[in-house]
Image (spheres, helix red, strand yellow):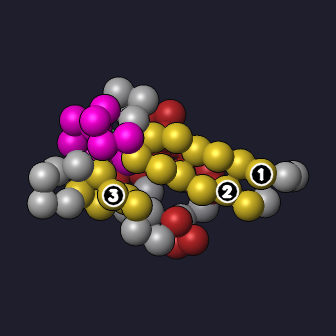
């Protein structure tokens, strides 16, 4: 299944939860905002957990197809 994930920088408060759940996909930049690294390094399930665990709903997961 094809999927992608994006970060809404205005919503991100830098909690780091997404980095805990999917450390290959997310990192903090110099402003402590989350950035997307390489989503292919984490399972979709881990990325989904990270998206659901974001306290501010800053992450958007888009899944295409089955
Ligand atoms: S979990 Fe949400 S608020 Fe926390 S660093 Fe990741 S995107 Fe930002």
Circle 2 SS class: strand
**Res. 12 visible in picture:** yes
- Asked if marks 1 and 2 touch (Cβ < 8 Å), the reply is yes
The residue depicted at 30 percent of the width and 51 percent of the height is 34
Residue found 71% across the figure and 48% down from its top: 63
Q: CA distance from mark 1 to mark 2?
A: 6 Å
Does the numbered disc 2 mark a residue whose Cβ is under 8 Å from ligand 1?
A: no
Q: Quadrant of the N terminus?
A: bottom right
Examine the rendered structure and indicate whether residue 14 appears above or below residue 56.
Answer: below
On the image, the x and y values in percent for residue 30 come to 12, 60
Res. 24 in view: no
**Residue 40 position within the rendered picture, expressed as x and y whole percent measured from the top left:** 57, 71
- Report the residue marked by disc 2: 3
The image's mark for residue 64 is 1
Near-viewer residue (3 or 50) = 3
Label 3's element?
A: strand
Q: Earlier in the sequence, mark 1 or mark 2?
A: 2
Q: Does residue 39 appear left or right of residue 14 in this picture?
A: right
* Magenta residues (range): 8-18
Residue 25 vertical placement versus 53 (above, below): below
Between 28 and 17, the one nearer to me in the picture: 28
**Numbered badge on residue 35:** 3
């Amino acid at each position: 299944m094809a999927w992608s994930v994006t970060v809404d920088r205005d919503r991100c408060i830098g909690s780091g939860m997404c980095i805990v759940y999917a450390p290959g996909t997310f990192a903090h930049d110099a402003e402590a905002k989350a950035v997307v690294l390489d989503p292919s390094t984490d399972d979709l399930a881990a990325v989904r957990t990270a998206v659901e665990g974001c306290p501010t709903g800053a992450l958007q997961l888009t899944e295409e197809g089955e």
